[in-house]
Image (cartoon, grey):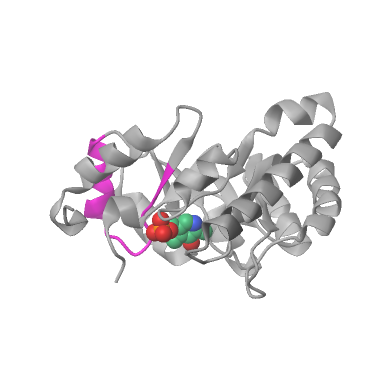
């Protein structure tokens, strides 16, 4: 086995890209890694990067090429929405109606329609953020009623475990919810609802098998975070 810490970011990125089915997009999760590391992945062709903290994103984005598409993937406090909305293409982690409305108001201020995903809670852990499966329909109808957000899909995280059957069950629950929401949308909204963000370094293969269209991979590209 090769030691991944010895390999370059570009070679690890290329290996991840090569391992993904063609319908699955890659978010390179660069949280806690410096701008130089992001630049190396950028130079190897990666354009979508994920960050989970507003201040860190605001500090790094100006140092890097303007054609990077930043995605926000972490828990977002409403008082940080004004920092994040001007910078990002997609917010994966919309986990409350209050946050949803705050994003809508901030997007209006920027004359922007903000692409968002609703975060679905499917994992066993009590502490994970997100809407329960039986709350998602209300969140979808709220999102559909707002003029300055565009509901692009759902995001989910599986239970943090080595039990692959458990992980698979969580992802299949998310896929079923995705299909059910999509089926209930108007024809216009349905054509925009095309992102199911699930899968991280350790469970991305299972996620892809279960219908993921977007994986969020940090460690397998940038190495262990400090
Ligand atoms: C950090 C993070 C990831 C990436 O995790 P890795 O295990 O490093 O691939 C993916 N999604 C979210 C929401 C994260 O916070």
Residue that lies at the very extreme toward the bottom in this rendered image: 127
Magenta residues span 27-44
| The C terminus - image quarter | bottom left
Q: Is residue 111 magenta?
A: no
Residue 60's spot in the image, x, y percent? 34, 56
Q: In terms of depth relative to the viewer, which is nearer, 202 or 196?
A: 202
Residue 112's spot in the image, x, y percent? 63, 40
State ligand 1's quadrant: bottom left
Which of the 4 quarters of the picture holds residue 119? bottom right
Q: Residue at x 58, y 56 (%)?
A: 165
Q: Residue at x 74, y 60 (%)?
A: 131
Task: Note whether residue 87 is visible.
Answer: no
Residue that lies at the very extreme toward the left in this rendered image: 6
Q: In terms of depth relative to the viewer, which is nearer, 172 or 58?
A: 172
Q: In terms of depth relative to the viewer, which is nearer, 72 or 59?
A: 72
- How many marks the image carries: the answer is 0
Task: Note whether residue 9 is visible.
Answer: yes
Residue 9's spot in the image, x, y percent? 22, 48
Q: Is residue 41 magenta?
A: yes
Q: Residue at x 37, y 39 (%)?
A: 66
Which of the 4 quarters of the picture holds residue 79? bottom right
Q: In terms of depth relative to the viewer, which is nearer, 217 or 107?
A: 217
**Left or right, 226 with reference to 23:** left
């Amino acid at each position: 086995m090769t030691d991944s810490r010895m390999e370059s970011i570009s070679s690890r990125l290329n290996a991840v890209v090569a391992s993904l089915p063609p319908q699955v997009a890659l978010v390179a999760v660069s949280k806690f890694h410096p701008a130089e590391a992001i630049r190396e992945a950028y130079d190897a062709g990666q354009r979508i990067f994920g960050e989970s903290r507003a201040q860190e994103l605001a500090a790094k984005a100006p140092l890097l090429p303007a054609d990077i598409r930043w995605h926000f993937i972490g828990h977002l406090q409403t008082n940080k929405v004004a920092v994040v909305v001007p910078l990002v293409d997609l917010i994966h982690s919309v986990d409350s109606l209050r946050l949803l409305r705050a994003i809508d108001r901030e997007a209006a201020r920027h004359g922007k329609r903000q692409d968002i995903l609703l975060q679905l809670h499917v994992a066993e852990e009590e502490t994970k953020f997100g809407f329960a499966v039986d709350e998602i329909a209300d969140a979808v109808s709220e999102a559909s009623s707002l003029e300055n957000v565009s509901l692009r899909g759902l995001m989910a995280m599986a239970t943090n475990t080595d039990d692959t059957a458990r992980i698979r069950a969580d992802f299949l629950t998310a896929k079923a919810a995705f299909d059910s929401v999509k089926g209930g949308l108007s024809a216009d909204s349905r054509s925009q609802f095309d992102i199911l963000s699930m899968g991280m370094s350790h469970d991305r293969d299972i996620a892809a098998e279960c219908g993921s269209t977007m994986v969020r991979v940090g460690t397998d590209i940038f190495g262990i975070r400090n």
